[in-house]
Image: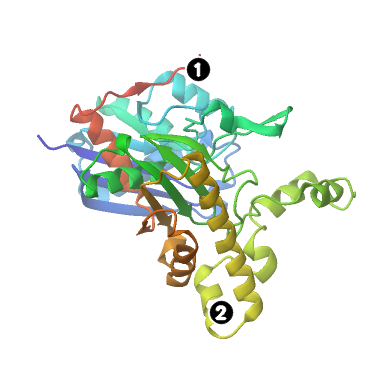
């Protein structure tokens, strides 16, 4: 039996949708939202009906009947820390996201829309590996300051999907491998996948790990707290220096890796220094992960948008290939990853997990 699955992936300025027949794409759409459209809504949750109606309209234009759908799968939002896996969307999850207990984020809408539409159609709705997936070991949570615990926020959906793909291509099981997976994009997360669980990973959102094209990563604390109390910056301005205006863009004025590689090719030595520094920091993070496994690493996996940049892949591989073979999977296919998570449940390969606030 084949399954027709609607995929919903809301972002801050767009809503990506697709329909798959099993894992074969049959239709996709990207609905862009300008600032004026979004501005009247006081919260992310209040955009639910607006975005859902746009999705339904796009499906109607494409001649895809709602009654032809067997299931809906969506990008998970800012939920409480969870185990990896596919979750059935339930009322408890929707209420949690409505209250935005861990913050407002466009991805919170995925489960909410899927639940509402799924109930109307009488079909199941799922989310897969939300950003709040947390399987870290207790020892990895110790920060060095008793008031602060290391938390787990990373590119769980793409990381888990690529890790499973590696296992499949190597004719083994994800649960039998030790992998270091580096998601290289606007944010960078480098994770230790030990026998199917991410037991340690840098917090890719909150200023930990390597710098990226627009995030600072870990910075020296002394100068940072002097900046914080200098009176020159608000809390929001400090946050932007970490996220959005940090990393390479703070040095070069651009976060476009294509432009930076072009600058290097034209002989810009400063651009080369800064880009090489990011590669250097990523390599150090990968090396640190190798110590978690006591050197017993099966593969190092590079993924995300920056893995398309040949210069970065070459330089990074030269630094880390002594640890384990390096595999490269450029880009990220979140839509297919969401479908595969739903299919594993629909085909009885795994059971859907149940979200509770307990």
Q: Secondary structure at mark 1?
A: loop
Q: Residue furthest bottom?
A: 266
Q: Secondary structure at mark 2?
A: helix
Residue drawn at x 43%, y 48% is 181
Crowding at dot 2, Cα within 10 Å, few <14 / some 14-19 / many 20+, comes out as some
Q: Nearer the viewer, residue 313 or 126?
A: 313
User: Nearest the camera: 112 or 166?
Assistant: 166
The image shows residue 141, relative to residue 299, as above or below, that is above
Q: Nearer the viewer, residue 67 or 247?
A: 247
Give the color scheme: rainbow, by chain, secondary structure or one colour.
Answer: rainbow
Does 117 appear above or below 59?
above
At x 42%, y 19%, the residue is 91
The residue beneath circle 2 is: 264
Place of residue 249 in the rendered image (x, y in percent of width and height, measured from the top left) = 64, 64
Give the percent coordinates (x, y) of residue 357.
50, 17
Q: Position of residue 92 (x, y in %)?
A: 45, 19
């Amino acid at each position: 039996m084949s399954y027709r699955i609607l995929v919903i992936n809301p972002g801050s300025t767009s809503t990506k949708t697709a329909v798959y027949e099993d894992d074969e794409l049959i239709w996709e759409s990207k609905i862009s939202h300008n600032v004026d459209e979004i501005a009247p809504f006081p919260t992310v949750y209040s955009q639910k009906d607006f975005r859902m109606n746009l999705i339904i309209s796009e499906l109607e234009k494409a001649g895809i009947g709602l009654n032809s759908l067997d299931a809906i799968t969506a990008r998970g939002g800012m939920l409480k820390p969870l185990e990896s896996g596919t979750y059935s969307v339930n009322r408890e999850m929707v209420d949690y996201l409505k209250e935005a207990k861990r913050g407002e984020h466009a991805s919170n809408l995925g489960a909410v829309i899927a639940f509402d539409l799924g109930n109307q159609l009488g079909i199941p709705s799922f989310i897969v590996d939300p950003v709040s997936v947390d399987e870290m070991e207790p020892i990895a949570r110790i920060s060095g300051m008793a008031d602060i615990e290391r938390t787990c926020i990373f590119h769980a959906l793409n990381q888990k999907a690529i890790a499973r793909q590696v296992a499949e291509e190597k004719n083994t099981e994800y649960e039998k491998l030790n992998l270091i997976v580096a998601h290289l994009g606007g944010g960078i997360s480098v994770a230790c996948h030990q026998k199917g669980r991410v037991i340690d990973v840098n917090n890719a959102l909150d200023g930990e790990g390597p710098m990226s094209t627009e995030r600072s990563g870990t910075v020296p604390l002394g100068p940072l707290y002097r900046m914080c109390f200098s009176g020159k910056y608000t809390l929001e301005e400090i946050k932007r220096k970490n996220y959005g205006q940090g990393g390479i863009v703070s040095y070069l004025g651009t976060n476009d890796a294509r432009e930076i590689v072009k600058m290097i090719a034209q002989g810009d030595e400063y651009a080369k220094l800064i880009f090489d520094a990011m590669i250097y920091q990523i390599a150090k993070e990968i090396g640190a992960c190798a110590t978690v496994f006591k050197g017993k690493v099966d593969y190092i996996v590079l993924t995300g948008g920056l893995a398309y940049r040949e210069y970065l892949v070459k330089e990074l591989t030269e630094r880390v290939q002594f640890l384990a073979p390096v595999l490269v999977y450029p880009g990220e296919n979140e839509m297919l990853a969401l479908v595969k998570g739903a299919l594993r449940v629909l085909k009885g390969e795994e059971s859907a997990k149940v979200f509770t606030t307990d």
